[in-house]
Image: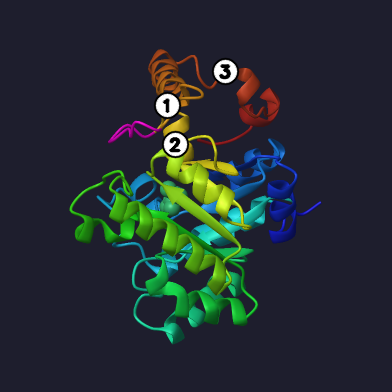
Amino acid sequence: MKNTVSTLLRQKQEGKKISMLTCYDYSTAKLMEEAEVNTVLVGDSLGNTMLGYPDTIQVTMEDMIHHCAAVSRGVKNTMVVCDMPFMSYQSSVYDAVLNAGRLMKEGHANMVKLEGGKNMCPQIEAIVKASIPVCAHLGLTPQSINAFGGYKVQGKTEKDAQQLIDDAKAVQEAGASMLVLECVPAALAGKITQMLDIPTIGIGAGNQCDGQVLVYQDMLGMFTDYIPKFVKNFANVGEIMKEAFQNYKREIQEGTFPDEAHSYQIADDVIERLYF
Ligand code: KIV
């Protein structure tokens, strides 16, 4: 059965944790579907992990649509959330609705995600009015990295924590169906989760959120440019891939690959009658 906004809300109400992973391509999406992950996020982190950018600022609508459409083709029951890239919604409410619509129509997303609190409520309200579910994102919001001056834990002081609480209430009020909390002290994320009706998904926000998300290359040890404290390595796939690449290279050099089992045959008498 397709995971939807209602499924995730029910999971919160029943105290069943929500699993989310980032995903950017068809084959990985199929594996996540088979693993019965509840929801996949086509995050603008694809700028870092797939495209090699230093941050998410350069990611375009075309990048997001391209990857989201690929992921959508790989899933049936898994809900697809797609990030709105930098400047696709901050510029105006009109741009926000138009671009959210493109992610749904061309990327086949089931929900869009945008970064911001009270300042983005007009955009959230308008997108929701257009019948597009919205996931808000608070705490460390990577698109604001230049304003933050670095990747830092958010909401540690009384003033910042209160701001986070007020923003969380505001996005729920504006119609958001889900909230990602990134790099927020665990106890604060726990209290916000209790306070809200909508599910919270934590990343570096402790285990009291209604669900968790990780960047899949991080949890598989495939992306080592920068490893945040909150990342847990669930398998050393990066090492396994490197070893496989080395073995492949070695077998080519030794002439043991491809062997007969991996080659196509032709009858000897046919080959003998040919002119070379
Ligand atoms: O882009 C992304 O991967 C995200 C997660 C870190 C929540 O927004």
Instruction: Provide the residue designation for mark 3.
Output: 259
Residue shown at the point (49%, 38%) measured from the top left: 216
Q: Amino acid at mark 3?
A: Asp
Q: As displayed, is residue 202 above or below residue 107?
A: above
Tell me the mark number nearer the camera, choosing from 3 and 2: 2
Q: Amino acid at mark 1?
A: Gly
Give the magenta range: 223-230
- State the mark number for residue 238: 1
Determine whether, in the image, residue 257 is placed left or right of residue 274: left
Instruction: Provide the residue designation for mark 2.
Output: 217
225 in the magenta segment = yes
Q: Amino acid at mark 2?
A: Gln
Q: Earlier in the sequence, mark 2 or mark 1?
A: 2
x and y percentages locating residue 202 in the rendered image: 49, 44
Of residues 266 and 101, the one nearer the viewer is 101
Q: As displayed, is residue 26 above or below residue 219?
A: below
Of residues 43 and 275, the one nearer the viewer is 43
